[in-house]
Image: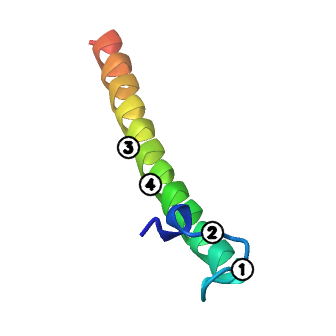
Amino acid sequence: MFDFWMNSCCGTDSFSTKRHRENKLQFLKFMRDNVEARLAALNAAIETIERQLTRSDTV
């Protein structure tokens, strides 16, 4: 998955600069999706606690 770290981007062997960039882009998108999922979970937890607090204030 993290092939772009192990390979040179200088055009040596059969690993091209374009392939290096494609791998890096794929990795960065994977990281973004992971962060977005964590953020959604945090937002849901915050909303739940806020809802519980407002409910306990009215009781």
> Which residue in the protein does label 4 denote?
34
Q: What element does badge 4 sit on?
A: helix
Q: Nearer the viewer, mark 4 or mark 2?
A: 2
59 and 33: which is toward the camera = 33
Between residue 29 and residue 24, name the one nearer to us.
24
Q: CA distance from mark 3 to mark 4?
A: 11 Å
Q: Residue at x 34, y 32 (%)?
A: 48
- As helix, strand or loop, the secondary structure at mark 2 comes to loop
N-terminal of the two: label 4 or label 2?
2
- Residue under circle 2? 8
Give the residue at x 28% y 14%: 56
Q: Are marks 1 and 4 in contact (CB under 8 Å)?
A: no
Q: Amino acid at mark 2?
A: Ser
- The earlier-in-sequence mark between 2 and 3 is 2
Callout 3–callout 4 Cβ contact below 8 Å:
no
Residue 29 at x, y = what percent? Answer: 56, 65
Q: Which residue is mark 3?
A: 41
Q: Determine crowd level at label 1: few under 14, some 14-19, many 20+ residues with C-alpha closer than 10 A.
A: few
Which quarter shows the N terminus?
A: bottom left
Q: CA distance from mark 2 to mark 1?
A: 7 Å
Name the mark nearer the viewer: 1 or 3.
1
The amino acid at mark 1 is Gly
**What amino acid type should be assigned to the residue bearing mark 4?**
Asn
Determine which residue is flagged by label 1: 11
Calculate the distance from the C-alpha at mark 4 to the C-alpha at mark 2. Answer: 26 Å
| Labelled disc at residue 3 | none
Work out how far the residue at label 1 is from the one at label 3, CA to CA, in angstroms. 41 Å
